[in-house]
Every structure is written in C-alpha cells, then in structure tokens.
Amino acid sequence: MGKSKLKSRMKNLLMFLPNMVILCARLMVDKRVPRTERALLAAAVIYAIIPFDFIPDMIPFVGQIDDLFLISLTLLRLIDRTDDVIVREHWRGGGDIVQLAESAATIAPLLMPKRIARVLLAKVKPTAEGSGLLANAAKLEPVLVETHEQEEQTDRLRRLADFGGRRSRAKSA
C-alpha cells in the first residue's frame, strides 16, 4: 500500500479517535474489565488528552497518530484478555471497533517514527493469552490473518518483543 493511501486510511481512522477515548472511559468503570486493564485504559485516555506527548497533538494529523496507536493497542490487549463482546457493548461509533482498532494498530506505526512505536508498544505488552489480535496488529501483519497454531503465535510474540530492533541494529552497524 502506498504512503498516500496509508495517510488517507489513517485520516479516516483518526475520525474515530474521540469515540475511542469515550469507549475507554466507559470501559474503565465496567466491573467486568480486569483492574490492570482499567488502569491501562486510564493511562491511554490521559495520554490522548494531554497535548504534550511523544508527538505533540498541536501538529495536525501526525500529533494524533500516536494517541490512536496507543488506544488501539490498549483495546486490542483488553480484547485479548477478556471478551470482545464487552468492548462492542460499549462502542457507540460506527463500524466494528475490533476491526478499527486492528487497522489503526497496523497502519499507525508505518506513519510514525519507529522508535516512538516501539516505546508505545512496550507500554502495552502483548501476552500469549487470547486471540493474538495485539500481536498480529503490532507486527504489521495483514489484519484479517488468523493464527491457529499455538507455536506460531508464541513465535510471533517472541519476535514482537524485538519489534523493529533488527532495523535499529542494522542502521547503527
């Protein structure tokens, strides 16, 4: 996919950012959401609301990409650890929230500095539990690919821990 197509798709996804922040706020008070996940949702909302973060929000378009990326990763982690029904129940925006979060988590790192993507990904650590949505999105793989073998998923999670590390080492060599 070309850079201009990615930017166009990201512009569409950024329209959902306010609804995603509201969704996170609703999920923070839902008792079915584990306490750790509620804390991560709170941190993601604070990060999105505060104008001074890794990429300042005052920079149009680019300033919101990191916010959308972190919220998407947090939602995908929640879905991996609980049930997508809980997230869908609170969603008031258009479209399917799971697919929107997967798309945002896949496209955003392509439009932002790799170092920032790695830092944000480190804040929302994926696990071997769940459906693997977070691992697939963070590895920049196609959104609709399903993994059925546990070994393959575990291997992906190991590679996820080194997200972009090979590129960094290659540049410094």
Image (spheres, rainbow, N blue to C red):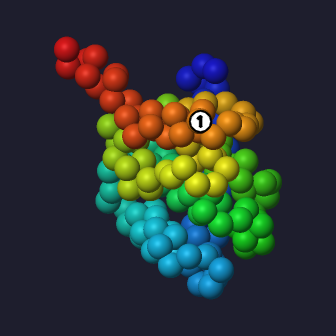
- SS for dot 1: helix
| Residue at image location 51% in from the left, 34% down from the top | 155
Where's residue 168, x and y in %? 29, 25
Closer-to-camera residue (124/58)? 124
Q: Residue furthest left?
A: 173
Crowd rating for badge 1 (residues with CA inside 10 Å; few <14, some 14–19, many 20+):
few
| Residue at image location 50% in from the left, 78% down from the top | 35
| Residue at image location 78% in from the left, 72% down from the top | 89
Q: Amino acid at mark 1?
A: Glu
Q: Is residue 111 visible?
A: no
Where's residue 164, x and y in %? 38, 30
Closer-to-camera residue (91/131)? 131
Counting every numbered tag in the picture gives 1
Image-quadrant location for residue 52? bottom left
Location of mark 1 (residue): 151
Image-quadrant location for residue 81? bottom right
Decide: is 172 above or below 109.
above
Q: Is residue 154 visible?
A: yes
Where's residue 100, x and y in %? 69, 49
| Residue at image location 79% in from the left, 58% down from the top | 94
Q: Quadrant of the N terminus?
A: top right
Decide: is 161 above or below 93.
above
Q: Quadrant of the C terminus?
A: top left
